[in-house]
Amino acid sequence: MQSHVTRAILFDYFKGNATVLQKHELEAWLSNPANQDLYFEYWWEFEKERMQWFPNEQVAFDKIKLNLRNSDLTIRETAAPNKFPRRRFWALMSSIAAVFVLTFLFSDLLLWKSVETGYGETKSLVLSDGSLVVLNANSVLKTARFESNAGPREVRLDGEAYFTVRHTEDDRKFVVRTSDDFKVEVLGTEFSVKNRKSGVQVLLDKGKVQVHYAKISEAITMNPGDLLTLDERGEISKAESKELKEFSAWRSKKFVFNKTSISELGQMILDNYGLKMVIKSDELNERTISGEIEAQNVEELLSAISSIFDLTITRNNEIIEIKTKHPML
Amino acid sequence: MENPKKLENNDHVFNKNSQGSHLDDPEQFIRNAFQNNTEAGFELLFRRYYKVLCNHTLRFVWSKEIASDIVTEVFISLWKSGKINEIEKSYGTYLFKAVRNRSYNYLNREFNKTVPLDETTNPSIDSQSPEKIILFDELQFRLEKAIDSLPTQCKKVFMLNRLDGRKNNDIAQELNISAKTVEMHLTRALKHLKSALSSYLLTTILCCFMLT
């Protein structure tokens, strides 16, 4: 018997307005598994059309990632007690000597464990003290391999990351180093650090941090909303940044532009995606863009930018060309 | 606004609004993504379904917190159990059934003293009976009707408390009534729902037990 279950009827049913006869037909129609798939597809469309509630997807996804990924950095290395037979003793001694030499040469490798992200990739990780780090694209985070339970917790960052630092009971400091000269010290708080070729920036969300810069004898204290910049020339400056959104928007795959110049856009794309932007129209050198764009990857971002700001953007492998739309087209 | 695409043709390019996809078969797209990179596939699946499932689950549990917990658990369990690799046809069907099952179990625990006979939260991969699907729909209609039939003030208090998770003192302040009155309304609302549902839930259990 031919069934007459249509989208319209299903939507009526979803609203609670189906007749008894329609419900009866629906039940028969559902006995075919393929129709069940279609049924739930329609539910998807129905819910999508009428969404009343917009829960925070990113928060939930971060939670899931946390739950699924093991803590990369809990390393419990215990030396197994071994009894070496005498005969092997000298052989062992010489091999230990070799190890020490190598250790000295490769101390960086042995002492630090790294987590890296590629272009266009972000990673979330939990450190062994329970602190959370979200690492932006093209970045490297190094943590100490053998963590003692006293003394400051230290990490080294090349690139960009957002830190949510857990306050420990014994007030252990948490230190983010970007070089031998520059470090950010906190007790427990939320902040971003950006260490790229163009300099270092620290933005504080919550809590209090102290920045130590070798060229300045006193530590610099930051309060929430402060943005600290260390530029390429080694000059340090502090500003009150009201636009916290801009800085950490990458964590929710949102791009926030606030009078951002095209060359700054190019720098961001180079830093995060490894693509070089070439500006083909002179007037674009003066142009700035402002707005918020949600994009899952660089293609979506460029597509959005080209349509919103009326630009022509073409990509050829690693090079992106950007120019204004030809008035004749 | 017209926008001829100047980018090179790339399967993964959505239109500028990442909320909706103009691809013909999103499920197939997700499936393909899975072949290449399970994590990317999982994320795509999540982004397509999370908000929609939250709204759907809300119809059953009437609490935003519980709804998002249930949906999150479904995704976590889907990955951890490895079931995600076994789904051959529609991810959507599996996900909707999973949230419905969990919502149902939640309702049972909240409103029914009897222990349900069918505690499975993970649906079988094979299709379930049509009657079960219809019964779940009926459950949701009934809930809606029961809540709608609450007296105005009572309904308002109930929604603020359960749906939005507001504290009783907040609600009392906003509606200009005493905290005690708020409590009274809540007790009344829950009692009403319980009686409207309990016999229904019991019947459903028996049906589910016999039909699965």
Image (tube, rainbow, N blue to C red):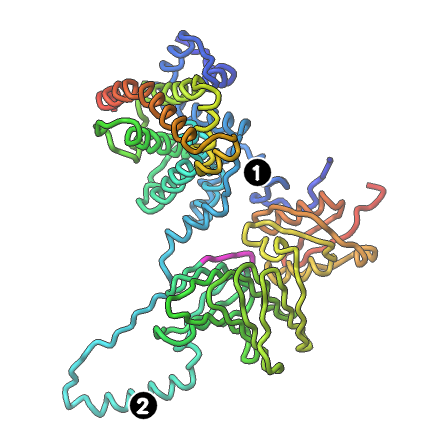
In the foreground, B105 or B74: B105
Q: Chain of mark 2?
A: A
The residue where tag 2 is placed is A97
Q: Is residue B198 left or right of residue B162?
A: left
Q: Nearer the viewer, residue A196 or B181?
A: B181
Q: Within the image, what quadrant is residue B100 found in?
A: top left
- Horizontal relation, residue A123 to residue B84: left or right: right
Q: Which residue corresponds to the image point at 48% horizontal and 34% vertical from the top-left?
A: B171
Residue A217 image point, x, y percent: 60, 83
Residue in the picture at 36% in, 37% down = B87
- Quadrant in which the C terminus of chain B appears: top left
Above/below status of A296 relative to B99 = below
| Residue A30 visible somewhere in the drawing | yes
For the point 45% across and 65% down, which residue is it? A115
What kind of element bears circle 1? Answer: loop
Quadrant (top left, top right, bottom left, bottom right) of the N terminus of chain B: top right
Query: What stretch of residues is rendered in magenta?
Result: A119-124
Residues marked 2 and 1, same chain: no
Which residue is at a point 65% across and 47% down the rendered structure image? Answer: A292
Crowd around label 2: few <14 · some 14–19 · many ≥20 (10 Å) = few
Q: Which residue is mark 1?
A: B19
Q: Amino acid at mark 1?
A: Gln
Residue B68: give x, y in percent of width and height: 42, 39
For marks 2 and 1, give the CA distance: 60 Å
Chain at numbered mark 1 = B
Residue A61 horizontal/vertical position (percent) = 45, 47
Place residue B12 in its image quadrant.
top right
